[in-house]
Image (spheres, rainbow, N blue to C red):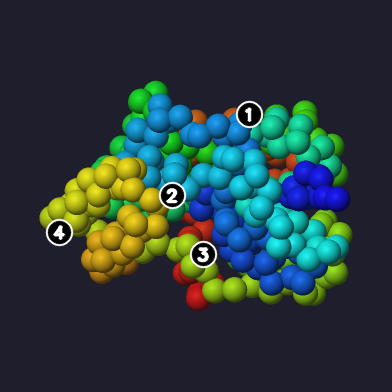
Amino acid sequence: MSTDADRLPQFVIAGAPKAGTTALHAALATHPGLYLSPVKEPKYYLTGGRPPPRSGQRGPGDAHSAQEWVWRREEYLRLFDGAPAGAVRGESTPFYLHDRAAQRRLVADVPGIRVVAIVRDPVDRAWSNWVHLRADGLEPEADFAAAVEREESRVAAGWAPFWRYRDLGRYGEQLRDLYTLLPRAQVLLLRYRQLVDTPDKTLDRVSAFLGVERGMAHTVPPENVKPYVADTLRHRALARVTRAGAALGAYTPPQVWRQVSRPLLAALHAGRAPRPPMPVEVRREVLAPLLPDIALLEELTGESFDDWRRDTGRGDFRSRRQG
């Protein structure tokens, strides 16, 4: 007879949105000794077994997105019912690293959980996060620096975690708190650049951490890279329609709005333009409050993250893979 312990994940991929969790999930899913949940980002441990409260869904598209969260325990357990005997079960929800209550719930439910945490240059990550939301017509602020500065007021107004451009990149604080709950041997810290620049070596490292054979996982083409969309009158008009539709989508099944929104997203993405370099003064402005956290991360890990202090970032996934 199976128990909950036989149906729960044995590892999770955490970190931050736009830090490579989707790419790692897809790559690990190719390993015959691993089983990744068919629903990526179920967000179960964010919920506490209750529906996500509307008080935290007040940003554009938030309420629609919240409908896809898996909060019922039996529904979550069923995600792993397809795991072959002996396979190591896992799921990917990047917000588990940022959300301290989720950390506690996860460790309490699965004390032996192994966490693969991916971190990325926090300014590059925030920029990619903003580009993603702009491309999908949800971010109304056309200026990246201004959007970052609005973060605190948006959080206070109940916008969802995906809008925390700067705060999601405070990995030092997040990792410090996770280390109070788990032995360090149960946490593997990866850098986004390792996944992009040395994928085979990185996948072997993850495989060893998870106790499965090396050389069996392989990368797959990235699917979660959004185009940079220029701020035009056409984009603004389409984005207004998208945000209104997403608000109405909160009252329909998620698949209905996804189907209806496809032509809108295609029209939005048709306005793609070359991604401009981030002005040095903007990078410095966004980075400055994060410098103490980078120092904390270095203290915790004994690794140097000095490249994050530079005036230029390292680019997005697609451009670096094609360069």
**Residue 247, relative to residue 295: is it above or below?**
below
In the image, residue 89 sits, relative to residue 306, either above or below, namely below
Q: Which residue is mark 2?
A: 129
Helix, strand or loop under label 2: helix
User: Which residue is pictured at 38% across the width and 41% down the height?
Assistant: 62
Calculate the distance from the C-alpha at mark 3 to the C-alpha at mark 4.
27 Å
Q: Nearer the viewer, mark 1 or mark 4?
A: 1
Query: Badges 3 and 1: C-beta atoms under 8 Å apart?
Result: no
* Residue at left offset 33%, top offset 48%: 252
Task: State the CA–CA distance, disc 3 to disc 2.
Answer: 13 Å
Which residue is disc 1 drawn over? 101
Measure the C-alpha gap from mark 2 to mark 4.
Answer: 22 Å
Q: Residue 234's mark?
A: 4
Q: Quadrant of residue 30?
A: bottom right
Mark 3 or 1: in front is: 1
Kind of residue indicated by mark 4: Arg
